[in-house]
Image (spheres, grey):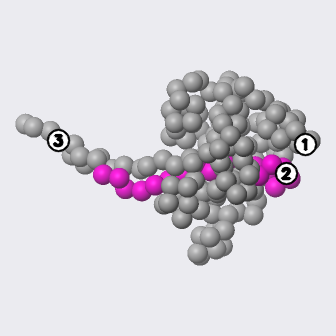
């Protein structure tokens, strides 16, 4: 029997970076995020010299999740992640953790950060701050994007991942 699986792009998703509402850093470059993930940068001062926060605590949903895999493959280009990263049991726990720990940065799927009370899905949860991410080496408001559906669809948000369905 001949077996020809087919793949079809089903959706576009984004990785959202979230921080505590008390954290003044709301912009980050992909370069700096890569440096955090690999352990090259360990303190908020290395990202923002004016930051009063100390060590960065990176939190994922699960150590074996597709989010971690995307971070290794697509953001860090295969380099191993720092041993100082934390994993919770699920995305909701990441949001809970980040909302309670000022120096934490959470990495979750963009679909988890929406404001459940907003039927238009044009606002984010008020428990956390969603970071703007820039492809450029230095993040400014003018070159940084948050994972709104429009920015995902237009390819402006840099942490995009495609979702495929495989049929047999």
Looking at the image, residue 45 sits to the left or right of residue 19; the answer is right
- For the residues labelled 3 and 1, the Cα–Cα distance comes to 56 Å
Report the front residue among 8 and 66. Answer: 8
Report the residue marked by disc 1. Answer: 50
Secondary structure found at label 1: loop
Around disc 1, counting alpha carbons within 10 Å, would you say few (fewer than 14), some (14 to 19), or many (20 or more)? few
Q: Residue at x 56, y 47 (%)?
A: 159
Q: Nearer the viewer, mark 2 or mark 3?
A: 2
Of labels 3 and 1, earlier in sequence is 3
Residue 79, position as x, y percentages in the image: 57, 24
For the stretch drawn in magenta, what is the main secondary structure? Answer: strand
- Residue 92's disc is none
Q: Nearer the viewer, mark 3 or mark 1?
A: 1
Looking at the image, residue 85 sits to the left or right of residue 69; the answer is right
Contact flag, marks 2 and 3 (Cβ < 8 Å): no
Q: Is residue 133 magenta?
A: no
Contact flag, marks 1 and 2 (Cβ < 8 Å): yes
Which image quadrant for residue 146? bottom right
Around disc 3, counting alpha carbons within 10 Å, would you say few (fewer than 14), some (14 to 19), or many (20 or more)? few
- Specify the segment rendered in magenta: 8-26
Contact flag, marks 3 and 1 (Cβ < 8 Å): no
Report the residue marked by disc 2. Answer: 24
Residue 69 in the image: above or below residue 16: above
Residue 22 in the image: above or below residue 1: below
- For the residues labelled 2 and 3, the Cα–Cα distance comes to 51 Å
Looking at the image, residue 140 sits to the left or right of residue 3; the answer is right
């Amino acid at each position: 029997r001949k077996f020809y699986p087919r793949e079809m792009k089903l959706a576009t998703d984004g990785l959202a970076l979230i921080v505590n509402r008390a954290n003044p850093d709301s912009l980050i470059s992909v370069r700096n995020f890569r440096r955090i993930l690999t352990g090259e940068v360990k303190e908020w001062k290395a990202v923002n010299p004016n930051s009063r926060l100390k060590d960065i605590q990176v939190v994922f949903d699960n150590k074996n999740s597709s989010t971690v895999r995307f971070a290794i493959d697509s953001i860090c280009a295969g380099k191993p992640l720092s041993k100082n990263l934390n994993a919770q049991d699920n995305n909701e726990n990441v949001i809970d953790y980040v909302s309670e720990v000022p120096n934490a940065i959470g990495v979750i799927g963009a679909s988890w950060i929406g404001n459940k009370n907003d039927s238009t899905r044009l606002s984010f949860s008020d428990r956390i701050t969603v970071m703007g991410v820039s492809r450029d080496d230095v993040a400014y408001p003018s070159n940084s994007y948050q994972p709104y559906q429009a920015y995902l669809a237009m390819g402006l948000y840099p942490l995009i991942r495609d979702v495929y369905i495989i049929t047999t």
